[in-house]
Image (cartoon, coloured by chain):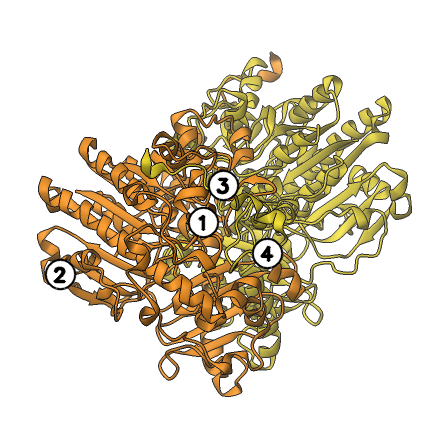
Chain colours: A orange, B yellow
Amino acid sequence: MNILFVMYDQLRFDYLSCAGHPTLETPNFDRVAKMGVRFTQAHVQSPICGSSRMSFYTGRYASSHGAQWNGFPLRVGEVTLGDHLRKLGMGCYLIGKTHMVADAEGMTRLGLAPDTVIGARQSECGFDAVVRDDGLWGEGPDGFYDRKRSPYNEYLKSKGYDSENPWADFANAGVSGDDIASGWFFRNADKPANIREEDSETPWLTDRALEFLETAEGPWCAHVSYIKPHWPYIVPAPYHDMYGPDDVPEAVRSELERQDPHPVYRAFMSNNIGKSFSRDEVRAKVIPAYMGLIKQCDDQLGRLLDRLEETGEIANTMIVLTSDHGDYLGDHWLGEKDLFHQQSVKIPLIVYDPRAEAEATRGTTCDALVEAIDLAATFVEVAGGEVQDHIIEGRSLMPFLRGEAVEDWREVVISEYDYSVTPMRAELGVSSRDARLFMVFDGRWKMIHAEGGFRPMLFDLETDPQEFRDLGGDSECAAEVARLYGHLHAWGLRLSQRVTRSEADLEAMRGRGARVGILPFLYDGSEVPEALTEKYRGTVKRDYTKG
Amino acid sequence: MNILFVMYDQLRFDYLSCAGHPTLETPNFDRVAKMGVRFTQAHVQSPICGSSRMSFYTGRYASSHGAQWNGFPLRVGEVTLGDHLRKLGMGCYLIGKTHMVADAEGMTRLGLAPDTVIGARQSECGFDAVVRDDGLWGEGPDGFYDRKRSPYNEYLKSKGYDSENPWADFANAGVSGDDIASGWFFRNADKPANIREEDSETPWLTDRALEFLETAEGPWCAHVSYIKPHWPYIVPAPYHDMYGPDDVPEAVRSELERQDPHPVYRAFMSNNIGKSFSRDEVRAKVIPAYMGLIKQCDDQLGRLLDRLEETGEIANTMIVLTSDHGDYLGDHWLGEKDLFHQQSVKIPLIVYDPRAEAEATRGTTCDALVEAIDLAATFVEVAGGEVQDHIIEGRSLMPFLRGEAVEDWREVVISEYDYSVTPMRAELGVSSRDARLFMVFDGRWKMIHAEGGFRPMLFDLETDPQEFRDLGGDSECAAEVARLYGHLHAWGLRLSQRVTRSEADLEAMRGRGARVGILPFLYDGSEVPEALTEKYRGTVKRDYTKG
């Protein structure tokens, strides 16, 4: 068995036709959904790229792996999906984005050079990188967003896109007269990107994935990780005008939300992103482009699926389609991600298991409370291993793929957000340490705890599926709040760092003390079998005092 | 400034004359207490050697570093005291015991060989090991407790102690007729160990420490870590009969404690160790030997102090005397350590700072709630650094040494114990994961939370200083329980794993997005200063479509 682990960046759970989008047709996503199971309650461990991805790639909660925001390095030595899979004989490869930042200080401390196999894996959160490109080759007064190599930019240069940063000047920009019309400006989102469609980011990465499939020797897990439909919202023809004003839904937002909002929510609404996405002209420009980007992703997914069918590999390849978080797109007066409304924290998750055991569930949906960290556990099981649950905190989804009853599944999903680096921290007047949010969601009630002395937020998705009414201050809901805090507090005390001792190791340790002669309770030895103490008995060998 | 960081293993807080012991005279401990500050409320992060020590050596709580019991390896890459101090130009050396087990699997994964400088530090929890010997060279059917080298055993062999394991057969055994009288049997605790006093463990290690002092080049932090007065309870002449029946106090225990005890406490009382130490003949044999071992430690401490005075180094050497946990010695119907009565969780802590700023506090005591992890923070400050509080969870004790007012000191001490490997886990019928205890102590109220569905234990040390009355089930104390749970739960959600980003790093990151051209909120660019977007503007360089 191989695993094709496809991630789209910032793909909202409901922007797929199989998930009920009214006008966006995604036949290739739907094709995988028909072959497998679509999880309707899948959530990320943190609604921001880097932190969410480190959870996917370690199977651990954000506050367990510690890389709690973009650009927080994953600490050296943290056990990754790649470490687990390689031990089981499965290669683990990266084609695309991870948002990983290496723990350079830790690597130096341990003498690990990035150009060694071990150092490269430490730098790439455990993957063997076939291609690594995170996109977002931003330019500002401080220069490149990231000075590391961009294979995509090199590719564009080789194709005649004449610029220091063709990612910015062609792939993510249109043309306005003789001028560059940057995709960073929403005003330009309806323009076609100034690039051949086949040279744009999504087809380029698909080509790399197809090259990988040609030569890959299994078993492998390939993380094909697209940087789209993440902003900049701009897409080449013909996708740029496939969707228009009629496809822009009314924003899911209510004036109720702006009346006496929770201070944290207020701060996020009133930041630049929230204010911008609250403008109708922004949504009118952005959403059709976002849909075009998804449509392009769908077409490129079709190429991957066709190839797997042509080669027959579809019969022994698990396919996973998911995202690292959603996109508010102006809903709840917010843009991007970062908070815990379902537009942000919920993700599409479609899993196809080719094996006969999964026959009964094909084309079905599963409403279990699923977390991003469950994929690492699932993949370990696919690779034939036992989940090392002293390290991986997620649980295998295999029973759901096989339609098996699961009695003791988790009762709540936990997701976290560290906003210590954002302007909202200063606005709220909290310390870096307190700039942290925790979501607890049981499928109906969603509570958000904010460190720093705030009251919790609370939503009842049964009576308020759109999450407009924050009941966190409602005394009638005190029992629900207390119950959800109970879950959060139990989770806070979870065993998450005993990563060097498995249950099997503990079992081997039990009783070992006595077996190796550590017996701190004997009066005269008669208390235990003689075999345990016989080495402590005997004749004194020599009177050293005469020596 | 240098730091002489002396640890005694299993030294109870109240077995020193400066701490009020009625008959044990420890003039050298008292001598340091007169020169410095004695902390009366110092607590370990876990009342067991290995876990406690890893907290001392990392400045982090047990559930943060994850080495939660003896023999649980400290994970590779965990930042240690040595890492912090070396960065500041201070060497960090080990002379004695650490109870460290290397994360062999992690080291293999990262390609670190134990015989390199980096690998050796990883194997020795960050110390450069001058001498490493943990003692406890037990022998049972499975052979040596630990097959690693024992410099102490090698020393004994070189001195004519003719045995494969002279640690067991001479240093920790007496003579009975022609037979070895093992110190593992409490019956033999009143016999003199069959060894020249100067060859016994404590003087041997002192000699190694004196050798270090002769050649050391500063600034250095030397962890002189004695394995005594830890069991086996046996000591050479003349210490073996310095104390007798009159020195054995009545056990601090009450029949009340055995009436309907908390299930966890009951399990510990009824294990082999508890049962054994509840016997009067065990206490009668053990306690005088324990006192003799401490007296020997005190004499050897005198040698170290004398040398520092002779060389004048006392003027630029901080001296710290402490222990990794206490010893029940039959109090509370228990032996050894493991639970949270003060006999176990409280430690002696005496700190001498030679500098003028500490003049005002010499010979005083400090009642602040101190934790073992505070020493790492203190040492970093001594070495001239800023405490990296995203890694080190303790706080510097320097203000107390200088008599400065501290407004926002911690309100509670947290200590933890993982009993997953002990027989009590099975007896209580809990899973490994649930075999964990947490103590929260505010100076008056001490609550112990047990995972696994038990009620908490609660003691009021004001009205019940001996900790006999468990109020955990008393409804009148519900408010205290809730308050202490509040502290525990806040602690459970603490930020403990963001070890790759300091506060300064966060500050540098703030606003960086815009500076490097990441601007996900612009409609037309007019929202921000032109400098932030000018690189996104310009003339389209070439019409690649003609290329």
Q: Quadrant of the N terminus of chain A?
A: top left
In this view, the mark in front (1 or 3): 1
At label 3, the amino acid type is Arg
Q: Secondary structure at mark 3?
A: loop
Tag 4 subunit? A
Q: CA distance from mark 2 to mark 3?
A: 39 Å
- Nearest the eye: A35 or B279: A35
Tag 1 subunit? A
Q: Secondary structure at mark 1?
A: loop
Q: Secondary structure at mark 4?
A: loop
Q: Which residue is mark 2?
A: A362
Q: Which residue is mark 3?
A: A75
At label 4, the amino acid type is Ser
Q: Position of residue B335 (x, y in %)?
A: 55, 51
Asked if badge 4 and badge 1 are on a common chain, one would say yes
At label 2, the amino acid type is Arg
Q: Which residue is mark 1?
A: A177
- Nearest the eye: A171 or B515: A171
- Nearest the eye: A359 or A22: A22
Q: Which residue is mark 4?
A: A420
Residue closest to the far bottom: A476
Q: Is residue A76 visible?
A: yes
